[in-house]
Amino acid sequence: MEGEPTRIMLAVNQSTIKGYPHASISSSRAFEWTLQKIVRSNTSGFKFLFLHVQVPDEDGFDDVDSIFASPDDFKDLKQRDNARGLQLLEFFVNRCHEIGVACEAWLKKGDPTEVICLEVKRVQPDFLVVGSRGIGRFKRVFVGTVSEFCAKHAECPVITVKRTVDETPEDHVDD
């Protein structure tokens, strides 16, 4: 529709190197690239939709070394995980407010590949931006990538933004 901002969904995740609340190298790169190459100075013409998918362990517990002695222990764990996710989203929301770009942000739990594609279907952004760690073919065969899955299955155009060489850690799996 004319006059409505272009809605950009950006799937973001935390850094595996620095931990919360720091955004991953790939997420930060995808966001900054989108600002520089697409939004540019037209801040009123765009709206960011930030999605962070928290991945529970296979058994449903994030801290397998922790001792859970009461129901409150589980509540504390859930509250801590939500707080970490909110701190991550706060980073991107604050950055948008600094430069005057409208945004929304929310958390979901589950498999990022499935959740991102379901959220794309539900929210119907104009396009999806995802970061890419740039893992090699060999690791990709065994691990697969969220960005590849989204490019194949999301019901909107998908832009995959790779990290630059100088942003890539020694171990490509780190982000």
Image (spheres, grey):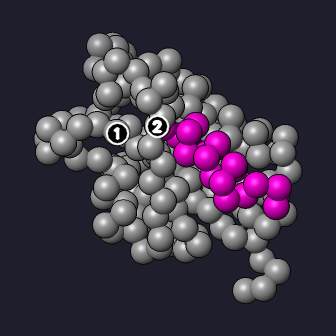
Q: Is residue 140 magenta?
A: no
- Please tell me whether mark 1 sits on a helix, a strand or a loop: loop
| Sooner in the amino-acid sequence: mark 2 or mark 1 | 1
Pointer 2 residue? 163
- Pinpoint residue 115: horizontal percent, then vertical percent: 40, 57
Determine which of the numbered discs, if any, sits on residue 19 in the image.
Answer: none
- Pinpoint residue 88: horizontal percent, then vertical percent: 60, 34
- Note whether 128 is above or below 134 in the view shown: below
Q: Which residues are magenta?
A: 26-42
The amino acid pointed to by label 2 is: Arg
Which is the main secondary structure of the residues drawn in magenta?
helix
- Pinpoint residue 15: horizontal percent, then vertical percent: 48, 27
- Note whether 160 is above or below 82 in the view shown: below
Q: Is residue 28 magenta?
A: yes
Query: Cβ–Cβ below 8 Å for labels 2 and 1?
Result: yes
Q: Is residue 87 visible?
A: yes
The residue that appears at 44% across and 19% down in the rendered structure is: 17
Pointer 1 residue? 134
- Which quarter of the image is occupied by the N terminus? bottom right
- Residue 94 sits in quarter: top right
- Note whether 149 is above or below 28 in the view shown: below
- Please tell me whether mark 2 sits on a helix, a strand or a loop: loop
Instruction: Tell me how far mark 2 sits from mark 1, CA to CA.
Output: 7 Å
Lateral position of residue 165 relative to residue 114, left or right? right
The residue that appears at 67% across and 59% down in the rendered structure is: 38
Judge by depth and name the residue closer to the eye, 15 or 105.
Answer: 15
Label 2 crowd (10 A; few <14 / some 14-19 / many >=20):
many
- Pinpoint residue 128: horizontal percent, then vertical percent: 52, 62
Judge by depth and name the residue closer to the eye, 87 or 148.
Answer: 148
